[in-house]
Amino acid sequence: MPSHSGLFTIIERAARKAAPRLRRDFNEVQNLQVSRKGPADFVSMADKRAEQTLFEELSKARPDWGFVMEERGEVAGDPSKPRFIIDPLDGTTNFLHGIPHFAISIAVEEPLPNGKREITTALVYQPLTDESFWAEKGRGAWLQDQRLRVSSRRELTEAVIATGIPFMGHGDFAEWTRIFGSIAPQVAGIRRLGSAALDLAWVAAGRFDGYWESKLKIWDAAAGMLLVKEAGGFVTDFRGGDRSIERSEFLAANDGLHSKLHKLLAGALR
């Protein structure tokens, strides 16, 4: 059984406290109160209740830490302390349509002496399957007590690649179409399942061989990025650099496939 920190225990306990209500709401999805947050971007009472539970639990444990949350936004804390980055329900559209593929995503971002920040703890928890994908910097990535490794496939012809697809009001259709047209003919399959957090967790677990998406928010990808890196993979922006969150560009895979996917992607964007 892997040892993990007291901090991770706090994070997982909070996620497991929020999960039962999400499961109940999912089973009664037709009765949810739903408000429109933007074009084709819905937020449900389930989102808000889960986020409130996570905020309350984590605030009790770390009262001077800040938060970045999908629904509530930023809550300032002591700037010298870490902060929590939370998506209480990644895959809201799946949830609202009765599609059983969504997750709670929690990351811890710590300040560095140079003024930058880095993700050091991550959890992506799937309430319906009770799968807890977690990572701590330098300790590897895990699914419960099973060590995770990115896929060992080296050939694009054997690879299944995940992505997100632009939709009404979100994303760059022209850019995505160019990238898709470059990558799809070279690989064994493309999948779009509707939860960036789980897409990245599945790359870490070797279920997907690679992943690309743009226009994500920090709470969509923060935890998943650490999972992939601690599972031996690479996450970069579309230029191959380390500014994924800043540019809102994410390309993830093992070392061999990452370089091949990056070459295709870069060619598509010239």
Image (spheres, rainbow, N blue to C red):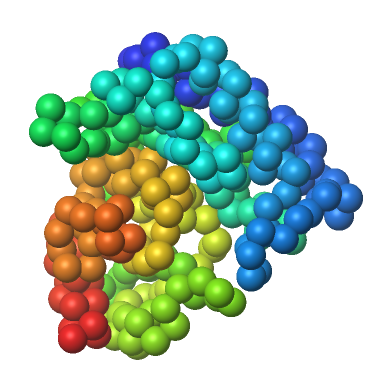
Report the front residue among 51 and 208: 51
Tell me where residue 255 sits by quadrant. Answer: bottom left
- Find residue 66 and report its horizontal and vertical position in percent: 42, 27
Along the line of sight, which residue is nearer the eye, 248 or 263? 248
Instruction: Look at 30% across and 25% down and name the residue there.
Output: 79
Which residue ends up furthest to the right in the rendered image?
31
Q: Is residue 15 above or below residue 175?
A: above
State left or right for residue 166 relative to residue 100: left
Residue 256 shown left or right of residue 249 in the figure: left
Image point (27%, 55%), residue name? 246
Looking at the picture, how far across and down is residue 172, in whole percent?
Answer: 42, 78
Marker count (numbered): 0
- Residue at 15%, 59% in the rendered image: 241
Where does the N terminus fall, quadrant-wise? top left
The residue under the point 65% across, 69% down is 40
Location of residue 231 in the rendering, given as x and y in whole percent from the top left corner: 27, 41
Q: Identify the image quadrant of residue 183.
A: bottom left
